[in-house]
């Protein structure tokens, strides 16, 4: 009897995933992060575009899992979507700032050349 | 004892079940590849720029890795460990990107400062150039003004000089005109005087214009007694008239020539004619004719103007000619 109880406990532990709550907050956060990356121009860069695509795919996968009541799994997938979107945003911001830095350097070089003349 | 044995057997069974459960939930001894990759990524990030430039993001990555490690240690499902390792790896990538962003920001900031410096330098250079240009323009303007002043001064000087020259010229013209008028008047007067003198001479002597000059011929019988060279009293008055007529007439040279007829010895006549000429010369000098201008020559009978065969001819040949040049 005791053996059977233990087995039940383990079984419950193994199959407890289905009982998690729907990760609404994570879903919203991941979608917002993806939109932010898109607004920041991430799709214009190949790396950024790839991350945005991954995030979108993960969000879609998570939504499917939520429909299937696989909420815990969906939660992890959404976390992946979240970091992909955040990485896309970071890459876009980096790219923008690099462009500004290069523009400033070009301007400096131009000014120096004018002075040198 | 029996109970202990039973319990031991049950624990062994439970241990075996736990092992089965561990296998079921993925509590393997070897970490999945994703976890190993995430570990390496975090270690790399610790040793590179994210540690200095994006410490917060790197810390987030470390925490994500710790969460994955805990999941691994807790024997979580392999997929969950993979997800968490994926998240940790992505957070490392985010920290790298954040570090790059920070580096780019710093670079942009430095470039901004450099740009400001370069603008300041360009402004200073332009200002200096402008100053130089302004100085050059001012100098050009000053030079132009100086040149204009100089040109004005020269023009005024030239005008004054021209006016002075004009005035002087006018005065000179007036003076010359006056002089000419004076000279003309003098000449007219002299001509009148000369004409008058010649007219008066014509009354006492024969006056003739020849190639060698104006020739005044005085008859020898009027001036001298025969064979004599002393002037007769009447000759004095006539020669006075001649002297008066010749005086102040501007003649350059007067030659007194003595001539005789052909009677008598030529040498005697030569000497007589010279003496007579010298006598006339001396008289004219005594009446104011300049000595240096007057000479005397005796030609004797060599230059007759008439036949010596007749009395009248010989009388004409005995003469004194005063050649005035």
Image (cartoon, coloured by chain):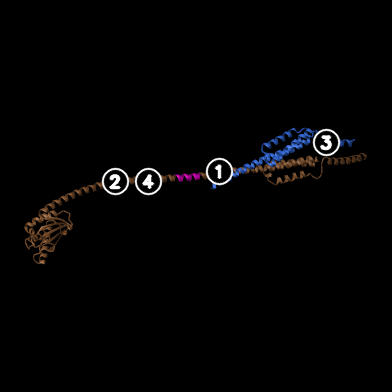
Q: Is residue A83 visible?
A: no
Specify few, some or many for label 1: CA neighbours under 10 Å numbering under 14, 14-19, or 20 or more: some
Chain letter behind tag 2: B
**Is label 4 in a helix, a strand or a loop?**
helix
Residue at image mark 1: B119
Percent x, y of residue A9: 85, 36
Chain letter behind tag 4: B
Considering depth in this image, is A73 or A20 the residue closer to the camera?
A73
Label 1–label 3 contact, CB within 8 A: no
Q: Is residue B86 visible?
A: yes
Residue at image mark 4: B151
The quarter in which the N terminus of chain A is drawn is top right
Percent x, y of residue B192: 15, 50
Residue at image mark 3: A15
Residue A40 among those drawn in magenta = no
Query: How far, Cα to Cα, is label 1 from label 3?
Result: 69 Å
Residue at image mark 2: B166
> Is residue B316 rendered to the left or right of residue A51?
left
**Is label 2 in a helix, a strand or a loop?**
helix
Q: Is residue B254 above or below residue B22?
A: below
Query: How far, Cα to Cα, is label 1 from label 2?
Result: 67 Å
């Amino acid at each position: 009897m005791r053996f059977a109880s233990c087995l039940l406990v383990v079984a419950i532990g193994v199959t407890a995933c289905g009982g998690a709550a729907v990760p609404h907050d994570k879903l919203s956060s991941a979608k917002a992060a993806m939109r932010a990356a898109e607004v920041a121009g991430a799709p214009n860069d190949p790396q950024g575009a790839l991350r945005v695509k991954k995030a979108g795919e993960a969000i879609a996968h998570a939504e499917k899992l939520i429909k299937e009541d696989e909420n815990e799994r969906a939660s992890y997938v959404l976390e992946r979507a979240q970091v992909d979107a955040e990485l896309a945003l970071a890459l876009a911001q980096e790219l923008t700032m690099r462009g500004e830095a290069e523009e400033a350097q070009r301007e400096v070089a131009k000014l120096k050349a004018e002075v040198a003349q | 004892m029996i109970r202990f044995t039973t319990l031991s057997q049950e624990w062994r069974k439970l241990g075996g079940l736990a092992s089965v459960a561990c296998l079921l939930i993925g509590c393997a001894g070897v970490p999945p590849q994703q976890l190993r990759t995430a570990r390496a990524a975090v270690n790399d990030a610790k040793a590179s720029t994210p540690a200095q430039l994006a410490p917060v993001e790197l810390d987030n990555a470390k925490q994500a890795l710790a969460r994955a490690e805990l999941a691994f240690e807790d024997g979580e499902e392999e997929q969950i460990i993979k997800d968490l390792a994926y998240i940790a790896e992505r957070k490392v990538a985010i920290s790298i990107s954040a570090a790059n962003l920070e580096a780019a920001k710093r670079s942009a900031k430095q470039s901004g400062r450099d740009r400001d410096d370069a603008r300041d330098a360009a402004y200073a250079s332009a200002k200096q150039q402008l100053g130089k240009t302004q100085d050059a323009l001012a100098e050009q303007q000053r030079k132009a003004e100086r040149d204009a002043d100089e040109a004005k001064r020269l023009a005024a000087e030239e005008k004054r000089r021209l006016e002075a020259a004009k005035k002087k010229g006018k005065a000179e013209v007036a003076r010359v005109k006056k002089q000419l008028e004076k000279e003309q008047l003098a000449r007219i007067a002299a001509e009148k005087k000369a004409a008058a003198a010649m007219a008066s001479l014509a009354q006492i002597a024969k006056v003739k214009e020849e190639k060698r000059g104006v020739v005044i011929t005085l008859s020898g019988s009027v001036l001298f007694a025969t064979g004599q060279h002393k002037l007769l009293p009447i000759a004095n008055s006539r020669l006075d008239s001649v002297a008066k007529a010749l005086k102040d007439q501007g003649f350059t040279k007067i030659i007194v020539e003595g001539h005789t007829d052909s009677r008598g010895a030529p040498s005697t006549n030569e000497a007589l004619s010279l003496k007579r000429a010298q006598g006339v010369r001396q008289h004219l000098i005594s009446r104011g004719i300049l000595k240096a201008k007057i000479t005397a020559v005796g030609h004797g009978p060599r230059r007759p103007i008439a036949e010596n065969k007749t009395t009248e001819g010989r009388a004409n040949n005995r003469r004194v000619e005063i050649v005035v040049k």
